[in-house]
Amino acid sequence: RSATEIAQEFLDRIAVLEPKLHSFIAITPEVAIAQAKQIDAAIAAGETLPPLAGVPIGIKDNMCVRGIPTTCGSKILKNFVPPYESTVTQKLAQAGSVMVGKTNLDEFAMGSSTENSAFQLTANPWDLACVPGGSSGGSAASVASGECVIATGSDTGGSIRQPASFCGVVGLKPTYGLVSRFGLVAFASSLDQIGPFANSVEDAATLLGVMAGYDAKDSTSLNVPIPDYAALLTPDLPQSLKGKKIGVIAETFGTGLDPEVETAVLNAIAHMESMGAEIHQISCPRFRYGLPTYYIIAPSEASANLARYDGVKYGMRDADAENLLSMYANTREAGFGAEVKRRIMIGTYVLSAGYYDAYYLKAQKVRTLIKQDFEQAFASVDVLVCPTAPTTAFEAGSKKEDPLSMYLSDLMTIPVNLAGLPGLSIPCGFDAKGLPIGLQMISNVLREDVLLQVAYGYE
Ligand code: GLN
């Protein structure tokens, strides 16, 4: 079949599934068909095809694609059409991928269930009454349901790994700075990182290889050589685990962890041992301070990043305001949802004079201690493992009114962002209700090669 026929098949499948799933904020058939036609033309001309030629992809709607609305799941950006292209979507287009749509997310990527989207609820393809996780819930659901083959996500505190876990797909948050953030709508700039969703480790490796690389337009971009990640995965499965030192993070087990998740994760670890991995018990005592530390640093950065939405330059503007100040205030009052306002208030509070030292500065110090726990662990192991999330997907509506219980979903993913490390979630079983369970694997800075090899060996 031609790339155009394949693109059309996926668009048809999207048309059938979307009334139930709502994974996409916008479906982009014109873009998809135009990109697919280019691939068909390249095939007809006998050209060498790029690595993602003709592969249908979903793009999280906080990444700018020139000329296509980017809402970030917010009313305040409802009519925003970016005049520029994010580096990552540019690289993906050059690699031949075919964009079928922009995927749903929690407003400004703040959330763990995609219920904070201003536009729609996305359903978990395994159980439509459950959430797909978040904030990249639309991307995870679209890959899990076969609406597209691969998708992009962004992960500030778990937004790729937790939805990957809830939807039973592979999700990878790379080392901070490996993938350019240029054109990604900023949430918490020292934590945000873009990464891939896929149905296999190999696909995730290919996608990461396309996305990664130095970009002068992102001041935190790392100028390092990018290995051919996919080529590192040998088909000789058990070999890639032989002799690998795997550390089990002791503090992630016990109270608060769903017993079915615990069993599946322990079985996965036993399986890795049977394939030749060396299993070590590792303690990361400061891991448990990750959540409170994150909820000081992330809202602080968010409150600064979101100051730009004042009705002047981007998206919506209150039309009836009497003066400039009320225009700002009314636009922000009408444009932002409850969770975003909560974060702005927390961030503004902890950054205010007199509180800065008590909260923000202290949080930065704890962040360093958490990093040290990881550094110590990686002195003796190659990869750390733990559950990705304490539970499987929960029912829509069950946590929306209780922000603290929602925040707990990211207990195990957040420390990885605070330390800037790569982390991956891979399916490792199902609970009694048939909902997928995710195993999190974490490696040292820029060791995506080892991380992917271990994940591939396990898969
Ligand atoms: N759920 C976390 C939050 O609400 C993480 C979100 C993310 O990684 N973007 O902040």
Image (tube, helix red, strand yellow):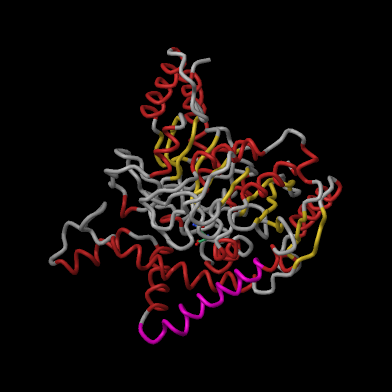
Could you tell me which quadrant the C terminus lies in? Answer: top right
Identified at 47% across, 79% down, the residue is 361
Could you tell whether 287 is left or right of 356 in the image?
right
Which residues lie in the magenta part?
353-375
Identified at 57% across, 42% down, the residue is 227
Farthest residue to the right: give it. Answer: 274
Identified at 47% across, 80% down, the residue is 359
Could you tell whether 323 is left or right of 364 in the image?
left
Q: In which quarter of the image is residue 374?
A: bottom right
Q: Is residue 110 magenta?
A: no
What percent of the width, then of the height, locates residue 249?
A: 73, 64
* Viewer-nearest residue: 261 or 367: 367
Farthest residue to the left: give it. Answer: 322
Image height of 435 relative to 371, above or below:
above
Image height of 183 relative to 98, above or below:
below
Question: What number of labels is visible?
Answer: 0
Q: Is residue 365 magenta?
A: yes
Image height of 237 relative to 387, above or below:
above
What percent of the width, then of the height, locates residue 286?
A: 65, 74
Helix, strand or loop: magenta stretch:
helix
Could you tell whether 106 is left or right of 383 in the image?
left
Could you tell whether 141 is left or right of 354 in the image?
right
Image height of 34 relative to 91, above or below:
above
* Viewer-nearest residue: 393 or 232: 232
What percent of the width, then of the height, locates residue 434?
A: 72, 44
